[in-house]
Image (cartoon, rainbow, N blue to C red):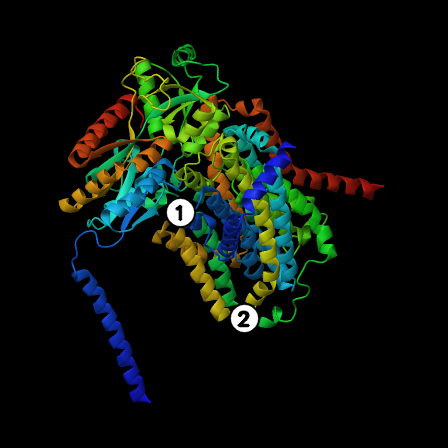
């Protein structure tokens, strides 16, 4: 009996050892990147603008890179939870972060104690641009941007605007407008895009100034009236731009960009950037992005890195000037 | 007329073999997800969303919707059978449902839950069909002050929830509020009670909290006792509710359906809070409030109806304005947009097949779920016969898997275990977890709403007096608060007068 037990044990030991060694074999076989699925971390809850953008492009990327792409949602804290996760991941190119402009450029300026350094994330490529549009509800008395500004000047502190949260693009851009035009408007942060939309539609706040995708259905149906936009929007050519109206400084970009943890090899970064570039050239993809309110814009690697650095500086200065923290 | 034409069109869309299949798949998966403790519709829909990109828009929404309201059906099963909620919205069903099971009436409890859910779900779908556009106008009227009023009234109802000491209930509610404040300040974004942890910056995960306090602690409590299987063996009387059950439950189901639906249409309310309110309401309105907590069927019928009609209500802002009321609806928005269908005010006009097809399939889905769930009662009841040494580890396993499935974050598992232990201690010391959950959910909502309201009025509290809906709720809450002591006082004085005569 004891002998049988002994052999059983030996057999199991042998099996476990074989499996363990098989595991290490898989690692030592250094195939070319990429040779297994790539994880794309989306630091916002499903259904948002970032999530939509990634789902549109994920399949194309998978095609171009030859491996499946898996989307992982790690929402919370303005996107910083997901960002921290990626900054600590292995820099082998199998974990990507897809984040919006606010995560890369505004959060570092706003939050002094981020659990990661901005240099821990290396930007790879950004591919979609969302224009910002200022809108009021259908029943609101202001038909043009001038009327809104005039009313705001007449009633300092009485008007309020809805944002999708402290530190979001929809918050900072209005603060920029307030500084440039010398206005006193109360900021009311709501929970996310839907929250701010409900607030304006229900008349609880006077206007919002946010990315196009969040308000596109209401703009198309007429429930929201657009007064001005940060840049020209092809679908609504009649909307004037802030530059035309004399406030060129209150323009903000909103885009979505991929980044990888620091230390990822340059060759890997190049491969990912090329895959993204190829993907955005596909007309169907561009059309889908346009449908949800975005336009294709490809900026990558060093250029993107410099852009982000410049923007962080701009945001830090502005936040200090406007005393937002 | 107009509506009949539309709904017939909708049925023609929903009754295609393709969409029927998706409806069935969704309902079935939803029930399964609901039954398994910890695993919830949010995580599952997030996982299944990419698969839906390859099927047409109508089919994908039908399936996802089926998962969502199917989960509300299934959640009550484990609540009744093993006192562990399958969903956070089934917490309240544990109170009386489990007691009924211990009295051998598991079948009746499961049956009334299934029927109640069916009636409520059908009612909700009917309402969507008939008066959605009007409802949205009402829902939009809910700004921060109204929210504060409503949530505050809900919090006051915590008093009615406590089965034992009201003081202990209030204590737990406050602990819940403190736990709810962990994370980022809603207005300024400063960190509160996060102790430097990035995960805690997002707050305590509610699934971890609920599963720990109700699931893990239940298992721990039971391991301590020596349970004899005879309690359940052979004492299973009728598998369906009898006539008396129906009579008692008719009112709660009706009230629950209406309450759940109208609360569900308000963005941000969700399906959990209405069930608590329904339970408290039934307890207040019952002629025998002391039976609540010992196996009163109203305590199962009301909340179960509520969570199903609330899940129907959640769809109203989505289908009419493209406004998501919770995370799951937001995912559906995403799903629709990927298919090129813009959810929004024009959905009904531009994609009537999606709009009416989804509504028609909700009717079909409710029928399917009833048909699925009734015969399954027999099988679920058999779960009670599984020996604990197999059942309890399985339950713990599902709780862990379910909790991990939400954020793939192991910190949530630590939370689960901490609250499991805490929940166990609470049970031993007779502190209730229900008020804690209510405080945890409502506290942050009230705080955010209150601060937003004060920002709107620049610090002027009289804002609440000038907004009729908010004022109504606050007065109601106040009346509720003082009603118990006032009534007791009046009774005492009346008794004195009687004695003197």
Instruction: Say few, some or many: other residues with alpha carbon within 10 Å of mark 1 (under 14 / 14 to 19 / 20 or more).
Output: few
Q: Distance between the residues labelled 1 and 2?
A: 52 Å
Q: Are marks 1 and 2 in contact (CB under 8 Å)?
A: no
Is B399 situated above or below B268? below
- The residue under label 1 is B54
Q: Is residue B185 left or right of residue B219?
A: left
Of the pair B49 and B341, the residue shown nearer to us = B341
Dot 1: what SS?
loop
What quarter of the picture does the C terminus of chain B occupy?
A: top right
Give residue B374's quadrant in the image. bottom right
Give residue A235's quadrant in the image. top left
Is B121 situated above or below B134? below
Of the pair B237 and A221, the residue shown nearer to us = A221
Of the pair A272 and A135, the residue shown nearer to us = A272
Eye-nearest disc, 1 or 2: 1
Q: Which residue is drawn at 49% across and 63% down?
A: B219
Counting every numbered tag in the picture gives 2
Q: In this view, does B101 lie to the left or right of B19?
A: right
Where in the figure is residue A274, as x and y percent of width and height?
19, 41
What quarter of the picture does the N terminus of chain B occupy?
A: top right
Is B365 situated above or below A1? above
Q: Callout 1: residue from which chain?
A: B
- The residue under label 2 is B226
Where in the figure is residue A291, as x and y percent of width and height?
37, 32
Q: Which residue is drawn at 66% across and 59% down?
A: B108
Discs 1 and 2 lie in a common subunit: yes
Where in the figure is residue B436, as x and y percent of width and height?
51, 47
Where in the figure is residue B461, as x and y percent of width and height?
52, 24
Inspect this view and state whether residue B415 appears. no
Q: Is residue A216 left or right of residue B492?
A: left
Of labels 1 and 2, earlier in sequence is 1
């Amino acid at each position: 009996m004891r002998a049988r037990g002994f052999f059983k044990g030996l057999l199991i030991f042998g099996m476990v050892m074989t499996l363990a060694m098989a595991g290490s074999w898989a690692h030592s076989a250094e195939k070319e990147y990429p040779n297994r699925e790539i994880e794309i971390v989306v630091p916002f809850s499903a259904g948002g603008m970032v999530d939509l953008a990634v789902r549109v492009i994920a399949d194309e990327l998978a095609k171009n890179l030859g491996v499946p792409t898996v989307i992982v949602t790690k929402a919370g804290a303005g996107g910083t939870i997901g960002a921290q996760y990626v900054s600590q991941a292995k820099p082998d190119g199998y974990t990507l972060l897809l984040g919006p402009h606010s995560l890369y450029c505004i959060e570092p300026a706003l939050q002094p104690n981020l659990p990661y350094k901005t240099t821990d994330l290396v930007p790879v490529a950004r591919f979609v641009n969302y224009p910002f549009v200022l809108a009021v509800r259908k029943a609101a008395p202001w038909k043009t941007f001038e009327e809104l500004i005039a009313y705001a000047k007449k009633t300092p502190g009485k008007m309020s605007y809805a944002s999708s949260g402290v530190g979001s693009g929809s918050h900072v851009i209005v603060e920029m407008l307030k500084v440039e035009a010398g206005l006193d408007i109360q900021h009311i942060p709501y929970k996310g895009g839907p929250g701010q939309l409900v607030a304006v539609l229900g008349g609880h706040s006077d206007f919002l100034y946010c990315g196009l995708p969040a308000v596109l259905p209401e703009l198309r149906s007429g429930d929201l009236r657009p007064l001005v936009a940060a840049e020209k929007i092809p679908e609504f050519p009649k909307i004037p731009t802030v530059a035309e109206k004399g406030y060129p400084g209150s323009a903000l970009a909103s885009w979505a960009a991929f980044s990888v943890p620091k230390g990822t090899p340059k060759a890997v970064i190049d491969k990912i950037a090329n895959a993204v570039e190829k993907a955005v050239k596909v007309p169907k993809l561009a059309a889908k992005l346009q449908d949800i309110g975005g336009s294709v814009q490809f900026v990558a690697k060093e250029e993107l890195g410099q852009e982000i650095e410049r923007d962080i500086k701009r945001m830090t200065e502005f936040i200090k000037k406007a005393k937002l923290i | 007329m107009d509506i009949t034409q539309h709904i017939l069109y909708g049925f023609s869309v929903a009754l295609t073999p393709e969409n029927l299949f998706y409806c069935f798949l969704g309902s079935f998966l939803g029930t399964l997800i609901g039954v398994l403790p910890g695993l919830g519709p949010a995580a599952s829909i997030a996982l299944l969303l990419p698969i839906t990109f390859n099927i047409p828009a109508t089919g994908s929404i039908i399936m996802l919707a089926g998962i969502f309201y199917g989960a509300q059906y299934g959640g009550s099963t484990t609540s009744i059978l093993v006192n562990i909620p399958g969903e956070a919205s089934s917490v309240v069903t544990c109170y009386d449902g489990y007691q009924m099971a211990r009295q051998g009436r598991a079948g009746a409890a499961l049956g009334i839950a299934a029927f109640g859910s069916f009636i409520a779900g059908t009612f909700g779908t009917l309402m969507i069909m008939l008066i959605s556009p009007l409802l949205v106008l009402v829902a939009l009227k809910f700004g921060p002050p109204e929210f504060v009023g409503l949530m505050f009234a809900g919090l006051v109802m915590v008093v009615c929830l406590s089965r034992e000491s009201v003081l202990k209930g209030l204590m737990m509610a406050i602990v819940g509020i403190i736990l709810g404040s962990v994370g980022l300040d809603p207005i300024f974004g400063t960190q509160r009670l996060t102790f430097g942890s990035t995960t805690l910056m997002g707050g305590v995960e509610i699934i971890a909290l609920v599963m720990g306090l109700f699931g893990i602690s239940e298992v721990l409590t039971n391991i301590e006792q020596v349970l004899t299987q005879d309690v359940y063996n052979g004492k299973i009387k009728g598998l369906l509710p009898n006539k008396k059950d129906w009579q008692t439950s008719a009112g709660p189901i009706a009230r629950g359906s209406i309450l759940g639906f109208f609360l569900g249409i308000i963005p941000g309310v969700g399906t959990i809070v209405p069930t608590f309110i329904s339970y408290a309401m039934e307890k207040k309105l019952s002629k025998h409030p002391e039976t609540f907590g010992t196996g009163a069927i109203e305590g199962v019928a009301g909340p179960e109806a509520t969570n199903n009609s609330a899940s129907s209500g959640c769809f109203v802002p989505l289908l009419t304005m493209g406004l998501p009321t919770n995370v799951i609806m937001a995912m559906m928005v995403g799903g629709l947009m990927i298919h090129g269908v813009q959810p929004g005010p024009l959905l009904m006009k531009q994609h009537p097949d999606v709009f009416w097809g989804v509504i028609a399939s909700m009717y079909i889905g409710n029928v399917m779920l009833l048909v699925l769930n009734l015969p399954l009662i027999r099988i679920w009841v058999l779960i009670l016969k599984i020996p604990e040494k197999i059942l309890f580890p399985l339950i713990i396993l599902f709780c862990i898997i379910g909790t991990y499935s939400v954020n793939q974050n192991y910190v949530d598992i630590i939370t689960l275990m901490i609250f499991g232990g805490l929940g166990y201690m609470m049970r031993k010391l007779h502190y209730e977890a229900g008020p804690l959950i209510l405080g945890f959910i409502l506290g942050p909502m009230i705080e955010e709403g209150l601060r937003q309201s004060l920002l709107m009025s620049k610090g002027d509290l009289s804002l609440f007096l000038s907004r009729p809906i908010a004022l109504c709720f606050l007065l109601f809450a106040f009346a509720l608060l003082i009603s118990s002591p006032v009534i007791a006082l009046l009774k005492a004085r009346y008794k004195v007068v009687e004695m003197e005569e």
